Image (cartoon, helix red, strand yellow):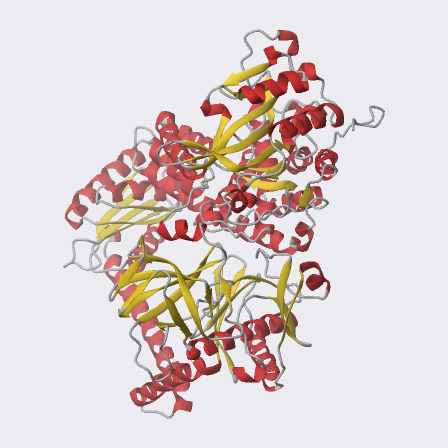
Amino acid sequence: MAADPTLPRPRRGAEIREAFLSFYQGRGHRLMASASLVPDDPTVLLTIAGMLPFKPVFLGQAAPPAPRATSSQKCIRTNDIENVGRTARHHTFFEMLGNFSFGDYFKEQAIRWAWELITEVFGLDPAHLVVSVFRDDDEAAAIWQDAVGVDPKRIIRMDEADNFWASGPTGPCGPCSEIYYDFHPEQGDDAIDLEDDGRFIEFYNLVFMQYNRDAAGTLTPLARRSIDTGMGLERMAQILQKVPNNYETDLIYPLIETAAALAGLDYPVLDARGQTSLKVIGDHSRAITQLIADGVTASNLGRGYVLRRLLRRVVRHGRLLGIDRPFLVAMGEAAIALMAAAYPQLLVRREVILAELVREEARFLETLERGEKLLAEVLAARPERISGEAAFELYDTYGFPLELTEEIAEEHGLTVDLDGFEAAMERQRQRAKAAAVSIDLTLQGAIDQVAGALEPTDFRGYEALDQPACVLALVVNGEPATVAGAGDAVQIVLDSTPFYGESGGQVGDRGVLLAGDAGAGTEAGLIVAIESVSRNRSVFVHGGRIERGSLEVGQVVQARVDHTCRRRAQAHHTATHLLQAALKQVVDDGITQAGSLVDFDRLRFDVHCPRALKAAELEQIEDLVNGWISEAHPLEVAEMDLEQARASGAVAMFGEKYGEVVRVVDVPGVSMELCGGTHVANTAEIGLFRIIAETGVAAGIRRIEAVAGPALLPYLRERDRVVRELADRFKAQPGEILERVAAQAEELRTTAKELVAARGALAVAKASALAERAEAFGPHRLLVQRLDGVDGAGLQEAAQRLQQQLGEGAAVVLGGLPDPGELGKVMLVAAFGAAVVASGAKAGAFIGGIAQLCGGGGGGRPQLAQAGGRDGGALDGALVEARRRLADQLAGV
């Protein structure tokens, strides 16, 4: 049905999103919520495309949620990060509107609906539209021309590189058809070049997934052809709002205005460089806010590195605009306010987001200071110019702006090797593209191929720990096989299993597979020691080694879980639930989980918390958990609808993926969580709970480690052994050990202070006789001497004393070997009086250059600086050079 032309067209970003989703909902598509930016997929770091959450469906590894679906998916891409703000439409964070068919409708319906949506709902003039098709896709071209009525001149055939979608060298693939908006149709239809970014923008891509490509490159038609589309929300907003770029839409521009106000600037009148910085801040502010909301914390690895890099780019561009105070929180607040209506989770996670921004900005400002010091060391070496590699290291490692490096270099009469910098940047860019450009739908490894062809494993381990099962598949030493023998490392898939497969933080069970007729007390002809159980797309993979006999596909075995290990895991998993409940009571009801590990010998629980827990709080948490254990609460386990579970108050682990039906583990009155793990039947089975450590593992994340149940006895025995050994060593009773250790520590501190004082006195005594050797240069006095056998602190004190003794016009340089027998360590100190500094000499820059002559470096303040070197044999020559340089400078004053 055509849209009513009298109704207002969607223009605002929220209206465009709602119109797209409503359009396809009205045509039988199930509305799917956006998945997390942290994908449930080990082949990609972040969610980089709208179809990624449906990847298992397209591969046939999971049932489709419905025959048709539609979504607005959050996405992050950083492979073109250097283009952000420089082009009209490159972003790190963006939203992809999509409609999907899983073996339902296909090419003609997808094309007709796309055209109806963009011309009747969004009101785009067909004269402004151009479509592309794959060069050999006559079917799509005919649909566009005959069924839709597009002028043949505006149907452009393109090669495989542009219009044939493939996930990788093998797997599902097919032609695609893209829809472009033409900003200048008056230029005519002849010689249309869709690569002309100034005239055309591609905003809707229709992928016709109709083939499977094998290793030989042969295309075979798929039995269930599918549709995968994507419309860029930001691009459609640019078109409908008639602005020159995506950044000036209502999806981003409010953030640009916030940043401009913080800098005291007016975006419209800024030059291109200033506008680019504001665009980067606006774009990245959306990305960092959404990443933190989805559980990513800044670090130097993986997703954490992506977040940290984006955070630091925001601060860096803020400094370029003159924002010289912390401002990330202000940008975070603005981003939350802008996007919360579409993503309410931002409000739920607001405090976590803002706390992460505060911590990371403070850390980066410290890092910038280190970058400035590194640049000072580079300059102290007196290079002809700053190398591109050095400038790039400052930029990439320390977030030090290239522009600032150039400015400082210019002050020293130097230039920066910009070509070398760009070469280093391009190498990194190519590494990023190679790592993040595509979604790989192909299966990797033998066990992946095996698991991809099998139905989900029937898990029966909640009810039984010992049961017969049939071997469905076998991988031996990494290769698919039908039989395995003694000594082989194997991966086994059974039709059903009592073994828990690693999931939700809980490790997989251990146990054995025995010959099918092996009963208790009977020697089995086959023993397979199962050391781990993992899950591969809901298929349980039993990993281990055959200790005796042989195993074949189709053979029936007795699967027997190690009861002791299971009991330990159960106690730790239930204790983890109790721990989370106690944390909410003692620390903060809004505290959220950041990860967990349930092992046989301990548990580990990570929480989002901005501070260390106090000792009294840990004791209170321990008391609460042990109290609930002693109260013998029976656990109630039930399966229910996801929405029903949430309405009943069940806690879901943040970032975890849940189906429509979930398992709820309830400790009545204490804890209720969505959990698929194994648990005790009654809290009394845990016995005892003990916290053994509380540490920080990342910015804003605290880790609690604990031991419970049967695993606590070995832990206590080990601690008791350590106490006994310490008591023997200190000749004391256990209760006296702490006092003895404290007394010895205090004695060591006193001795260390006395030693430092003695060394300082020795240095001053040695140096006192040197003052008479000072040389006069007009109003200034110069003293350069060697002083061995004195450590760095002593040498620094001696130089300061001498400078003070000789007056404000004195320049003192001392160098020596702390250990005269060790030529590999050189110490150098420079102390300049105020009058020397006023003459232009700087102790930090000066001593760093002298240390270079001894194979080292260093620096410090203009009046006092210390440096070091590795070549003691060069020390005398370095001191001669130090005297010459200072004499020339002071004589010329």
- Which one is nearer the viewer's eye here, 720 or 764? 720
Among all residues in the image, which is located at the extreme right?
6
- Which one is nearer the viewer's eye here, 163 or 149? 149
Residue at image position (61%, 84%) is 627
Image vertical order of residue 90 relative to residue 761, above or below: above
Q: How many labels, in total?
A: 0
Residue at image position (66%, 63%) is 590
Viewed as shown, does residue 661 lie left or right of 549?
right
Q: Is residue 480 visible?
A: yes
Residue 854's x, y, as percent? 21, 45
Quarter occupied by the N terminus: top right
Residue 707's x, y, as percent? 47, 77
Residue at image position (57%, 61%) is 610
Viewed as shown, does residue 672 lie left or right of 811?
right
Quarter occupied by the C terminus: top left
Q: Is residue 413 visible?
A: no
Residue 92's x, y, as percent? 55, 37
Residue at image position (56%, 11%) is 192
Image vertical order of residue 496 relative to residue 692, above or below: above
* Quadrant of residue 341 within the rendered picture: top right
Among all residues in the image, which is located at the extreme bottom?
733
- Which one is nearer the viewer's eye here, 407 or 632? 632
Residue 592's x, y, as percent? 60, 62
